[in-house]
Amino acid sequence: MPLEPSSVGRRRRKTPVRSHPTVRSRPLPGEEGITRMADGGDYRLSQLDSLEAESIHIMREVVAEMERPCLLFSGGKDSIVMLHLARKAFWPARIPFPVMHVDTGQNFPEVLEFRDRLVRELGVQLIVASVQDAIDRGLVREEPNGSRNRIQTPVLLEAAEKHRFDCLFGGARRDEERARAKERVFSFRDEFGQWDPKNQRPELWSLYNGRVFPGESIRVFPLSNWTELDIWSYIEGHGVALPSIYLAHEREVFQRDGMLYAVNEHCQPKKGEPTLTAVVRYRTVGDATLTAAVESDADTVAKVVAEVAATRVTERGATRGDDKVSEAAMEDRKREGYF
């Protein structure tokens, strides 16, 4: 039987290799990482879209991994954005965790009014941990200067233990302060609620380890990679409502340590500190005794965005008296169990 002719040495016809019909094989200069389709559509995410997607992913990871999460809510812009993201993350279902406010009793009335209205509209459970109640019970003692900032920590830890929360969402961002800059998204806390910056878990490829033993907990910061400008740009783009004190308004103030403090029942000028009426706004919200305003004519969110884009001083550095105790003030409080 004759053998078939060998194919060895026979020239084969080359089939041209073609790229995917809808994707350019080589990007144009400056377009690395951007997918453009044949129809000319641009499928890249904006900076804010990427941050939003990351934050929503983190919140969903927490709900999937942890048993009893809770969102720390102060009524400030960061916690408001965080609550807005939580609503988007689980829509159309309700937000699957409560919110908790550690109430020092020295809050701005505009913030408390906004807090109550927002949680009522969203239908979420609000837990209020009262510092004044803790003082009355003897759990904490008020400092001689009248500040209640530092004594919030035992009140927070007591409330977390009472409600058996194993995870607390916080609105901290890395651009605010150096201690927050080196804290991971999932921040492990021991059975005493303390943070050890030398004992942090790796977060390679955005993989988060939420495993804890009984008594331990995790603080999670979905806004870690956001900046103040990102927050305000998101507020503008999504129409997020805020307390009125974030926009420029007239207020009676006095100067102390180079900052403008509002005259109110919790904060009064000392001898030699004259008062004046100025057009100011607040960049961050905390205790009325420690949070200063900045002179500004930004009476719309768009004007605030332009103002923030031009500033070179962080909001906490410019307006928070509690961070001026020492250079390590924030880290010291975090080691004790602070937000």
Image (cartoon, rainbow, N blue to C red):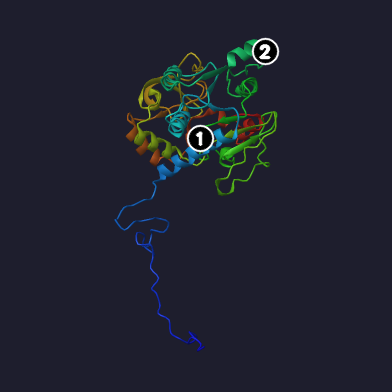
Name the amino acid type tagged 2: Gly
Residue 192 falls left or right of residue 305: right
Image check: 165 left or right of 97? right
Query: Which residue appears at 35% of the width and 62% of the height?
Result: 21
Q: Nearer the viewer, residue 280 or 283?
A: 283
Q: What residue is rendered at 51% in x and 15% in y?
A: 266
Residue at the spot x=54%, y=19% of the render? 127
Q: Position of residue 310 (x, y in %)?
A: 39, 41
Mark 2 burial class by Cα count in 10 Å: few <14, some 14-19, many 20+: few
Quadrant showing the C terminus = top right
Residue type marked 1: Gly
Q: Pick out the residue farthest to the top.
A: 136
Image x and y of residue 97, in percent = 53, 26
Disc 2: which residue: 138
Q: For residue 141, what is the image quadrant?
A: top right
Which of the numbered marks, if any, corresponds to residue 317? 1
Q: Is residue 240 left or right of residue 198?
A: left
